[in-house]
Image: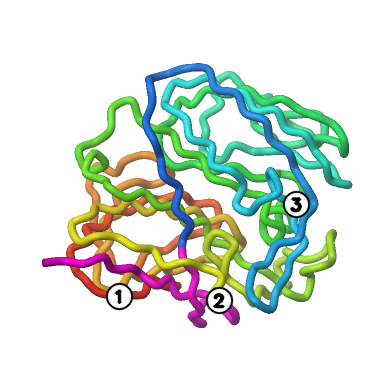
C-alpha cells in the first residue's frame, strides 16, 4: 500500500546556508502533433510581486508574471514571438540555449543582434527555430545584472525532442525550478542593485518563498523530471532528502553517461535536468 507524499522545498531569507521553504511551480507539458508554426504574444510590464510574506518587489515581468509564461514547443517548430514593452525602460529577450543558426539578429543582445532595445511602447517580433531539444530559458539582455538578477525578467522554454531517450520516456511528472535571489534593499528602487558588491538576502524557487509556496505531491512509483534553471546571480546547491537525482541533461542535451547525486549545483545561467525515481513514501524536504 502506498500514499501520496510531498517534498517540502526549503528555501528563503538569509543566504545559501539558510533554509526557508519554497516549492516549485508545476508546468504540465502536454504533447501535440509534430513540427509546426507557433506564434506567441508577450508583454513586458512593471508590476509588484509578493516574493515573501514580508517582501514585495518591483519587477519587470513578462506578461505580468514571474516566472514569465512557459514557451512549450517541439523540436523543429518555427516560432514567432511578438513582444510589446509596456515599461518605462528599453528591454530585449535573449533566448538562452537556442542555437539561432544563421539567425543571429534574433539573439536579443542590444547593440549586436538588434540595434537597440525594445523602446517603451514599441513592439518587436522575434523569429527562431527550435533546433535544440530540452530545457532552455529566456531573459532580458539589457542591464542583465539588475533586470535578470533581481527584477524577475526570465521564463522557461521546453522543446520536446523529436527522438526522446529511453530515460525521459519514463517520466510521469515534470517540474520546472527557476532559482533566483533578491536584494530587499532595492525592492522598490528600479535602476539599482544586482551589482557584485550587493548582497542578496532572499532566495526563491519560481519567485516564491515559504509560506507562499505549495507542496509538491507525487505518488510512489512516479518518475519525476526536475528542470533546474539558474535564473539569478547566485550558485545554489539543491539537495533532495530521501531520493537520489540522476543528472541526465546538461544545458538541454542528454548526457552520454548519466550519474547519481543527492546534491546538484545550479550555476547562474545553467539549465540542467535530473530524473528522480519517487520510490520512498513520506514527507521530505528539497532544499538549497
Return the residue at label 3: 60
Q: Nearer the viewer, residue 33 or 88?
A: 33
- The structure residue drawn at horizontal position 24% and vertical position 60%, both measured from the top left corner, is 219
Could you tell which of marks 2 and 1 lies nearer the N-terminus?
Answer: 2
- The structure residue drawn at horizontal position 11% and vertical position 67%, both measured from the top left corner, is 1
Could you tell which of marks 1 and 3 lies nearer the N-terminus?
Answer: 3
The quadrant holding residue 261 is bottom left
The crowd level at tag 1 (other Cα within 10 Å; few <14, some 14-19, many 20+) is: some
The quadrant holding residue 86 is top right
Q: CA distance from mark 2 to mark 1?
A: 19 Å
- The structure residue drawn at horizontal position 30% and vertical position 75%, both measured from the top left corner, is 283
Q: Nearer the viewer, residue 149 or 152?
A: 152
Q: Is 85 left, or right, of 280 in this rendering? A: right
Magenta segment, which residues? 1-23
Return the residue at label 2: 12
Q: Is residue 11 magenta?
A: yes
Q: Nearer the viewer, residue 141 or 196?
A: 141
* Closer to the eye: label 2 or 1: 1
* Closer to the eye: label 1 or 3: 1
Q: Is 17 left, or right, of 249 in this rendering? A: right
Q: Contact (CB < 8 A) between labels 2 and 3?
A: no
Q: CA distance from mark 1 to mark 3?
A: 36 Å
The crowd level at tag 3 (other Cα within 10 Å; few <14, some 14-19, many 20+) is: many
Q: Quadrant of the C terminus?
A: bottom left
Amino acid at each position: 500500500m502506498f500514499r501520496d507524499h510531498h517534498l517540502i522545498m526549503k528555501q528563503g531569507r538569509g543566504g545559501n546556508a539558510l533554509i526557508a521553504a519554497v516549492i516549485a511551480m508545476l508546468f504540465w507539458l502536454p504533447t501535440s502533433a509534430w513540427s509546426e508554426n507557433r506564434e506567441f504574444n508577450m508583454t513586458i510590464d512593471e508590476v509588484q510581486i509578493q516574493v515573501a510574506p514580508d517582501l514585495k518587489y518591483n519587477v519587470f515581468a513578462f506578461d505580468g508574471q514571474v516566472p514569465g509564461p512557459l514557451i512549450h514547443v517541439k523540436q523543429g517548430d518555427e516560432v514567432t514571438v511578438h513582444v510589446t514593452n509596456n515599461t518605462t525602460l528599453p528591454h530585449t529577450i535573449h533566448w538562452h540555449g537556442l542555437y539561432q543558426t544563421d539567425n543571429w539578429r534574433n539573439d536579443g543582445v542590444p547593440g549586436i543582434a538588434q540595434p537597440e532595445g525594445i523602446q517603451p511602447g514599441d513592439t518587436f517580433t522575434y523569429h527562431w527555430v527550435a533546433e535544440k531539444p530540452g530545457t532552455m530559458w529566456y531573459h532580458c539582455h539589457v542591464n542583465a545584472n539588475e533586470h535578470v538578477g533581481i527584477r524577475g525578467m526570465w521564463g522557461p522554454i521546453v522543446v520536446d525532442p523529436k527522438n526522446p531517450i529511453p530515460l525521459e520516456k519514463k517520466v510521469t511528472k515534470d517540474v520546472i525550478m527557476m532559482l533566483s535571489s533578491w536584494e530587499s534593499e532595492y525592492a522598490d528602487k528600479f535602476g539599482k542593485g544586482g551589482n557584485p558588491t550587493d548582497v542578496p538576502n532572499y532566495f526563491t524557487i519560481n519567485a516564491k518563498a515559504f509560506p507562499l509556496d505549495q507542496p509538491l505531491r507525487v505518488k510512489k512509483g512516479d518518475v519525476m523530471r526536475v528542470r533546474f534553471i539558474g535564473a539569478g546571480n547566485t550558485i545554489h546547491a539543491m539537495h533532495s532528502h530521501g531520493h537520489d537525482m540522476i543528472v541526465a541533461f546538461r544545458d538541454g542535451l542528454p548526457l552520454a553517461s548519466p550519474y547519481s547525486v543527492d546534491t546538484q549545483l545550479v550555476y547562474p545561467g545553467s539549465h540542467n535536468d535530473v530524473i528522480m525515481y519517487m520510490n520512498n513514501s513520506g514527507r521530505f524536504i528539497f532544499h538549497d
